[in-house]
Image: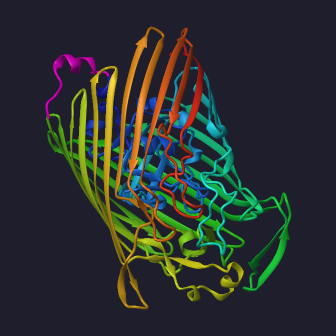
Amino acid sequence: MVAAPLTVSAQVADSLSRVLDEVVVVGTGTVHKLKDSPVQTEVLSSRQIKQLNGSSLEDILSMLSPSFDFSSSDMGSNMQLGGLSNSYILVLIDGKRIHGDLGGQNNLGQIDPDKIERIEIIKGAASALYGSDAIAGVINVIMKKDKKKILVENTTRIGSYFDARQSNRIQFNVGKLSFTTAFQLKHTDGWQNTTYENPNRYEKPVTNSINKTVNEFTDWALDEHIDWNINNKTSVYAEGGYYTKKIYRPCGIPDYKTYNFLYRDINAAVGGKFKYQEKNYLTWDVMYNSHAYNYDYTHETWETIRDDEGHSITFPYFPGDKSLQSKQERFMAQAKSVLYLDYNNTLSAGVEEKYDRLKSPNRLDEGEVHDNTIAAFIQDEWDPIKNFNVTAGFRMTYNNSFGSRFSPKLSMMYKLGDFRFRASYSEGFKTPTLKELHYRYIRQMSLITLNLGNEDLKPQTSRYFTAGIEYSNDNLMISATGYYNKLDNMITLVTIPRNEAPSDLLVIYDPAIVRMYKNMDNAKTAGVDLSIKYSPLKCLSFTGGYSYLYTDAYLYDDKDEVMRHIDIDGTATHRGTVSAVWNHRWSEYKLAVGLYGRLQSERVYQEDGNGRPYNIWKINTSHLINVGKNWKFNINAGIDNIFDHYETTYHGLHYGTTTPGRTYYISMNVSFGKKDKNK
């Protein structure tokens, strides 16, 4: 590799170099510059996010990082990282985990893209530091924080199919108190790419279906956050929020749907930070989260369920009635201390307790089930010699149903000029979720499928190896990372003979296919991630990324007494992203023009067909106008899916992408901010 000439390097010294000097925390839980982070960390910077102007967190991740894959549906985001799905990926907001399970999936729609400052990503098992949800990786979403005395901000976005986004933020300071109120509203009318239904599902072909590719929905959220800086050593916070989403389902040929979906989330948290002995500090958090999933009936409906004695009973619901399908609650408390010691040592230690409760009148035999996990972790970051770091730690986890597990972690980094060499080994431990153990539900794709929990599941363990090399200077950054993840007892849905399901459930649901959560005998994922960022000029930047994924999984067939290969649902072998952005400033006006592309190979599934390969291209123009000292206007206009790619795959089968084709949008951000003259 040859560095750019000095004249060019000087021109871009405040561009890519600012990203390399950006502070990150997710890799080790402590503060490091990105280029010196002991654990390989990917950062989607504030500038990248603003210039993309993504409509959602899913949009941002899929267009800027090839490692992620999404197949969104009514049930949630259905995210994948390194061949592993939602339940293996920990999503944090400012270091605190989100909660919200739509069909076993994270609902990333709760996160307002207009309030995201940057995103930190680590890939692979991070269980030693973050717990069982972090076997595939961790996403830490850093939200905007402004120190102005008064800030009022409004963003309005309108796009094709009445894709509307509204975001508001009000912040003000009173003495040592800071108050932030945030509101967001989203709506789309949805769209239909085809009127055909899968012929395997019906006796006669259905060519006039009213089912939509993406259903109409409306959601909104209101959040409040209060900070109190008691003195220069002690601060506390309190926050709470409410989120609701309603999905409107068409009623007509071929399925006369009689209810919509309704989701409601509540969250609350308190916590604080205490600094002592110069840089050392202690943090603590107590959190409560609740997620409820309901049917909202639009027509008279007779439902058949099991009573407490296992008998089938039928009774009616009328328009306006609501029926709780599941309610998930989580209580969590955690404390962490960071000590900066002599001899280039940084010691982190913490404890946490997590209590989960799942209620479901119709989908659990018991009606309510519980789970409790207690954990403690410790980590030491040590620089034994100049330019060499060793980070080692472990977590001890105790679960009330599955006992204890020790999970170690070891990372090393060596700096040689502009090069960084990193390698890590870590182990993961993940107990089955309450849904995987106990929950049952119907999924209607090409055929009616009954999905069953399995109380005989075993905990999952993983061993993760990664090694990478990175080169960076003021205008160029290139990295290559390889990984191997070996999972024992990985849990997945597997098709089983229909007669193995409880007979009363066969009467109630009459499914064509029955699937059950089972442990695979062995599974592994491996891959290579490549990334490049290049800024030949201060006004011009290029980025590119490629992710190769290999998966292999086997399950023992008790009937035939053989090992059978099982596809890990939703995985794609090849994924790539590219972008080119030009920007220029004229006094108080700045223009940025960005071209973005996402390319992906076929996505494989066990049932209902594979998702087709695709490539999607987007152009966005950003117009920033400063008016006086306090006002800013930012107008974005663009085209999603420039080349009008869309799929006419029959309803009930898997898609590569659900895009409706070429769409247009425009958004305006208006902000007023006034600095505190006393600071």
- In this image, 89 relative to 251: left or right? left
Q: What residue appears at the point 48 percent right and 50 percent down from the top-left corner?
A: 91
* Residue 414 appears in view: yes
Q: Position of residue 354 (x, y in %)?
A: 53, 60
**Hey, which quadrant is residue 583 in on the image?**
top left
Q: Between residues 489 and 475, which one lies in front from this camera angle?
A: 475
Q: Give the range drawn in magenta.
A: 1-14
**Number of numbered discs on residues:** 0
Vertical order, 597 against 467 (above or below):
above
Q: Between residues 150 and 378, which one lies in front from this camera angle?
A: 150
**Hey, which quadrant is residue 313 in on the image?**
bottom right
Vertical order, 230 against 649 (above or below):
above
Q: Position of residue 381 (x, y in %)?
A: 26, 47
* Residue 244 appears in view: no
Q: Between residues 463 and 497, which one lies in front from this camera angle?
A: 497
Q: Between residues 562 and 149, which one lies in front from this camera angle?
A: 562
Q: Is residue 131 magenta?
A: no
Vertical order, 23 against 537 (above or below):
below
Vertical order, 374 against 480 (above or below):
below
Q: Where is residue 179 in the image (x, y as percent from the top left)?
A: 62, 30
**Hey, which quadrant is residue 51 in on the image?**
top left
Q: How is the image coloured?
A: rainbow
Q: Position of residue 1 (x, y in %)?
A: 14, 35
- In this image, 252 relative to 422: left or right? right
Q: Does the magenta stretch include residue 4?
A: yes
